[in-house]
Image (tube, rainbow, N blue to C red):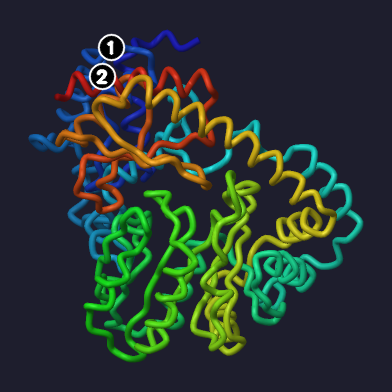
Amino acid sequence: MNKKPRYLQIVHWMREKIEQGEWVIGSKIPTQREIAEKFGVNRSTVITAIEIVKSEGLLEGKTGSGIYVIHNQWSLNSEMSPPDWNDLTKWSLQPSSVHTVQLINELETRKDLIQLSKGELGPDLFPHSEIAKAMGAVSTQIQDFGYGDGLGDLELRKEISRHLQKSGIKIKPECILIVSGALQALKLITVGILKRGSTVFLENPSYLHSVNVFPAEMTIKRIPVDGNGLRIEELFQQTFTRNASALFINPTFHNPTTTSMSLEQRKILLEKCQHYKLPIIEDDIFRDLWMDARPPAPIKVLDKNGQVLYIGSFSKTIAPGLRIGWLAGPEAVIKRLRDVRMQTDYGSSYLSQLLVKELLASGMYENHLKNVRTILKERRDYLLQLLTLHLSDVASWSKPSGGLFIWVLFKKKINMQKLFKQCINENVLINPGYIYHDHQSSIRLSYSYASFEEMEMGILTLKKSLLDVV
């Protein structure tokens, strides 16, 4: 047992972090609250420790910003300074996520928070028995743990080809590229297909505004989404540059608004895009999570000219940890992106590919989906009931027919950053609409992860927090 006073334990811990290079010069240290929680002490103890390390010349406070590392023992004793990694990262090609998104990514791993933000299935919906059976089956099928050819396991691509036929998409295995989730597919397209200086037309709001997929050299044009999906008439008021423009669209159970375009709207969109020779990247990762009725056919079904690149994923339907998705398109495009992929990471996990292949081939995936849809529908209906009971006087929403979320719009303007922080203080995590570039007072609530009891507690906490920020 460490008999050293707690404040000295914290001092030693901070010195060690700095000396070992875990906290580099220029980096911001954790907040007083985070350190206090880590060591189980009050903030005054943490402040005492910080002041000691400050007096040693290692830390410095910046008003309204936090405490930063300004030296380590080596730099204090040397005329030469180490590289300022914090400054270098500011000029990297890949920009940082906005602070709220970074915070959400960190907090989504905490077990003590009610997770009304997560875009994934809860642990109780993970197909434990199916995965176990698939593991047993593939253990005798493992032939090679090499890098592969970059396209992905052929048998998996054949199964995905068969799976897509159920939605009306007829595409051969050689026109399918296995990727590590939908975001990698999008990244490969921006790097391998789009030109420097291209214009990307993107739905607004969109989950893609919460991540930095597109290089800074590309121009983002935001097209509003309403209850019928993308406002097509506003898209075609824009100017398009041939071979230097593309449309990214999530037309089925759109994230975050949950809307779906009608089949008629999809036909109109494709016809107009064909006229303007505007490529379409269709993100359809939520399609299998329909509840009330099957959604309209993918835009890719209507595509006879190879104008649509189609993205799917098993992250939302099985588990994100498998990191298996796919990109389907013309063979020439797939060959090009295969080459880019081989320059990046040589392919997705071989074992994960075999597992997903077995789940598809055995029929276990379809059986799993039936169970998931039933439970998600129950949870969706329960969350809708809670919203009606507790928030109907201050907010509005629509009933999603699939996916994982409910999009909530508040009737009065609210300080959303303050609401977000207040909910965290009360151990509830939500996704505020502003991370999706929505300028309304809005939040995205998930019904896929939290239990019924947690959802009720979360909505009651949200109701209380609203009173505190108004």
**Residue at point 40%, 38% (across, down):** 106
Q: As shown in the figure, which amino acid type bears the numbered disc 2?
A: Val
- Numbered disc 1: secondary structure: loop
Drawn side of residue 121 relative to residue 91, left or right: right
| Position of 45 relative to 196 (above/below) | above
Residue at mark 2? 46
| Position of 44 relative to 434 (above/below) | above
Residue at mark 1? 42
Mark 2–mark 1 Cα distance, whole angstroms, equals 7 Å
Q: As shown in the figure, which amino acid type bears the numbered disc 1?
A: Asn
Is label 2 in contact with label 1 (beta carbons under 8 Å)? Answer: yes
Residue 299 in the image, given as x and y percentages of width and height: 51, 72
Res. 231 in view: yes
Along the line of sight, the residue nearer the viewer: 246 or 153: 246
**Residue at point 24%, 35% (across, down):** 410
Residue 206 in the image, given as x and y percentages of width and height: 34, 56
Q: What is the crowding at mark 2: few (fewer than 14 residues within 10 Å), some, or many (at least 20)? A: many
